[in-house]
Amino acid sequence: MITMSYIPEVNDYVRWKTHEGWVYFKDDIYITIELGTSDKIDSLVPMHKKHHTLLVCYNYCWNELEYVRKRKSKYEQ
C-alpha cells in the first residue's frame, strides 16, 4: 500500500516542530511559513503595508509538516 505524503500548498495552515502558520510561498525546493506580521511604520513602498516574519521549510522536511486547515485566500484570517 502506497501512502501519499502531505504536499503543502499556499494558504494551508501548518505546524512544523514548535512553529505554526500559513504557507505563504511555495516552489519545488521550499515553502515559507508565515509566523506573523506587523504594520510598517514607513511608506517607502506604499503597496506593502506589513512586515512578514517567514520561516523556510525545505522539501526534504515536508514530511514533518502537520496540515491543520486551509483558507480560501490570503485575506482570510
Image: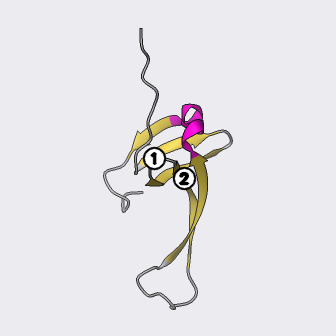
Disc on res. 51: none
Q: Which residue is mark 1?
A: 28
Circle 2 — which element? strand
Q: Characterize the local packing of mark 1: few (<14), some (14-19) or many (20 or more) Cα atoms within 10 angstroms.
A: few
Left or right for 57, reference 22? right
Is residue 75 covered in magenta? no
Say which quarter of the image contains residue 16: top right
Residue type at the position of mark 2: Ile
The answer to whether residue 30 is above or below residue 68 is below
Q: Earlier in the sequence, mark 2 or mark 1?
A: 1
The alpha-carbon separation of the residues under discs 2 and 1 comes to 15 Å
The answer to whether residue 61 is above or below residue 3 is below
Q: Residue furthest front?
A: 29
Q: Magenta segment, which residues? A: 58-66
Circle 1 — which element? loop
Disc on res. 33: 2
The answer to whether residue 71 is above or below residue 36 is above
Pointers 2 and 1 in contact (C-beta within 8 Å): no
Left or right for 23, reference 71? right
The colour mode here is secondary structure
The answer to whether residue 34 is above or below residue 15 is below
The residue located at (66%, 39%) in the rendering is 17
Quarter of the rendering occupied by the N terminus: top left
